[in-house]
DNA sequence: GCAATATGTAAAAAGTATTTGACATATTAC
DNA sequence: GTAATATGTCAAATACTTTTTACATATTGC
């Protein structure tokens, strides 16, 4: 699973900290997800896509086999 | 978080068992998710939406506050 | 260069998702 | 109405996500 979080976040000119706050998670969680340490829960995937004005299906790229 | 899995699955006339097999999970997992016992991981949400020929954003309804 | 802000990372603890195996009830087909 | 198929549920074990606290490095503005 890959994602466009960093790209869209930078377009919006907000920090990991600000995005984390909008999603009610910690900065470390956003950082880990941007760096593909693990996948977010489905609920967090929705919060992230809402905060970044996009859709879960656009924000995440599911590649079939895990990476 | 709610979802339309049961509805779409029945439209496709497949059992929980068959859907589970398509998604590489157990029947119990599909059953639990249909009955809102817990949310799937993001990867499973993608597999379910692909197996049901739809999108994650269409298959799941994120209601902001948890239920 | 210095201060402030932003990002990367790590370990322990708590919470959540999934599997396995098993049993019970419901539904359908004949 | 009996057999077969489908669904609901439970408990224990394993794996994964998130928080907290803390420190290190990078980037930016002045």
Image (cartoon, coloured by chain):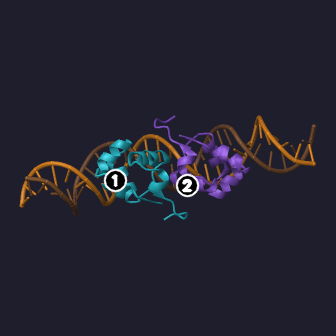
Chain colours: A cyan, B purple, C orange, D brown
Q: Nearer the viewer, residue B6 or A40?
A: B6
The disc numbered 1 marks a residue on which chain? A
Count the marks: 2
- Residue A26 visible to the viewer: no
Q: Are marks 1 and 2 on the same chain?
A: no
Badge 1 marks a residue whose secondary structure is: helix
- Residue drawn 67% across the image and 43% down it: B7
Question: Residue at label 1?
Answer: A9
Q: Is B7 drawn above or below residue A12 in the view shown?
A: above
Image position of B41 (left or right of A23): right
Distance in Å between CA atoms under marks 1 and 2: 23 Å
- Using residue A21 as the reference point, say whether residue C18 is left or right of it: right
Which residue is at a point 52% across and 48% down the rendered structure image? B57
| SS label for mark 2 | helix
* In this view, A25 is above or below D24: above
Horizontal side of A7 relative to C20 (left or right) equals left
The residue beneath circle 2 is: B46
* Residue B18 placement: quadrant: bottom right
Neighbourhood count class around disc 2 (C-alpha, 10 Å): few under 14, some 14–19, many 20 upward: many
Q: Position of residue B17 (x, y in %)?
A: 70, 51
């Amino acid at each position: 699973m890959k994602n466009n979080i960093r790209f869209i976040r930078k377009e919006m000119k907000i920090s990991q900290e600000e995005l984390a706050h909008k999603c009610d998670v910690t900065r470390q969680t956003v950082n880990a997800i941007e760096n593909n340490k693990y996948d977010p829960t489905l609920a967090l995937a929705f919060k992230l896509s809402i905060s970044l004005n996009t859709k879960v299906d656009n924000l995440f790229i599911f590649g079939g086999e895990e990476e």
